[in-house]
Image (cartoon, rainbow, N blue to C red):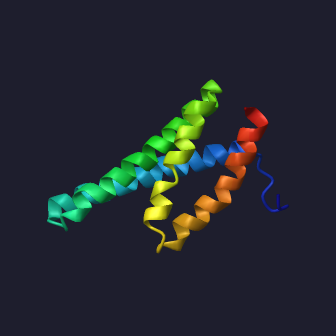
Amino acid sequence: MCRSCDCTPERCTMAYSYICICVGFFFVLMAAVDVLTGGFPIQYLFVPILGLSYMLAGILMQVGMNKKNKSTFVIGKVLSYFLPIAFILLIVFLVIHLIFIFHLCKYKKEVF
């Protein structure tokens, strides 16, 4: 781990779960505003489903961390893959995901 970031894998995992919850909520909110203003039909299903899955990923990772439940944590981790893959052209989601996935795997090895 680099010296500029002296955070533990547990802190990074917790931060990533909060990022998932916030970004997922933002996507659901964005889709709701889009529906109210008359957006494109494909977004009615695509964006809210991805947003909800990302929110659920963050929640499941938090529950898995708090209850020390490996299966819940892994389900949350797997659910967090879909949004960065779907929005691969927005490099920021992919970069954030790749940075944090290293810490998620390290946390999983240490705790479970």
Image-quadrant location for residue 38: bottom left
Percent of width and height locating residue 73: 59, 36
Quadrant in the picture for the N terminus: bottom right
Query: Is 28 on the left or on the right of 37, as rendered?
Result: right
User: In percent of the image, x 45 and y 55: which residue is there?
Assistant: 23
Query: Is 74 on the left or on the right of 20, as rendered?
Result: right
Percent of width and height locating residue 25: 39, 50
Percent of width and height locating residue 16: 59, 50
Percent of width and height locating residue 51: 38, 52
User: In percent of the image, x 49 and y 47: which residue is there?
Assistant: 79
Quadrant in the picture for the C terminus: top right
The one of 9 and 105 positioned closer to us in this rendering: 105
User: In percent of the image, x 67 and y 60: which residue is there?
Assistant: 99
User: In percent of the image, x 44 and y 41: which residue is there?
Assistant: 56
Image-quadrant location for residue 45: bottom left
Query: Is 89 on the left or on the right of 14, as rendered?
Result: left
The one of 53 and 20 positioned closer to us in this rendering: 53
The one of 8 and 94 positioned closer to us in this rendering: 94
